[in-house]
Amino acid sequence: MLKTGSKIIYSRLAYFWTFVFLCAGLLFVFFPDLVAQSLTGLGKFLYLSGDIHMPRDNVGYVLGLSLMALLVFITFQSARYPERLNLYQGLLISKITSTIFFFVLAISHGSSWILPGLADGFVALTLFLAHYPLDLRPAFF
């Protein structure tokens, strides 16, 4: 069970990620090519290989958008009810899964795919650290 201080920290962070996911989802809907080109451009700037593509004419794109909408909802609900462990666990499962598969894509399609993997991994890490009970954290946190 989260203590009051941890609840406040976690809730604020989850609200922040809700806003970020909502903005990202809207970018994916209205400007998917811009998102892909921006990530590819950043990858090239960092001397990473490969191009990131977001084709809009397949089932993966539609499923991705529907899951992004669900992610926004679950994150919002988790911020409102931080004591509901299943919402928090669902967020971690989502972000860890996407991190793993972005790294798989980096191996098979070019290292630029590491960028979204690092982003999702960072989200998972921040949610974990914010939710982890303050009195159980190692001293360096």
Image: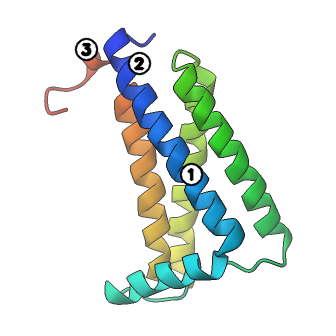
Instruction: Residue type at mark 2: give it.
Output: Lys
Q: Mark 1 or mark 3, which has the lower sequence index? A: 1
Is the residue under label 3 in contact with that under label 2 (CB below 8 Å)? Answer: no
Pinpoint residue 62: horizontal percent, then vertical percent.
81, 64
- Horizontal and vertical percent position of residue 22: 60, 51
Residue carrying label 2 = 7
Q: Could you tell me which residue is drawn at 48 percent across and 78 percent down?
A: 39
Check disc 1: other Cα within 10 Å, few if <14, some if 14-19, many if 20+.
some
Q: Secondary structure at mark 3?
A: helix
Amino acid at pointer 3: Asp
Q: Residue at x 41, y 61 (%)?
A: 118
Above-or-below relation of 11 to 51 = above
Q: Are marks 1 and 2 in contact (CB under 8 Å)?
A: no
Q: Which mark is residue 135?
A: 3
Asked if residue 42 lies left or right of residue 138, the reply is right
Q: Which of the pair 98/7 is nearer the observer?
A: 7
> x, y (%) of residue 23?
57, 57
Point out the tag, 2 or 3, that comes first from the N-terminus: 2
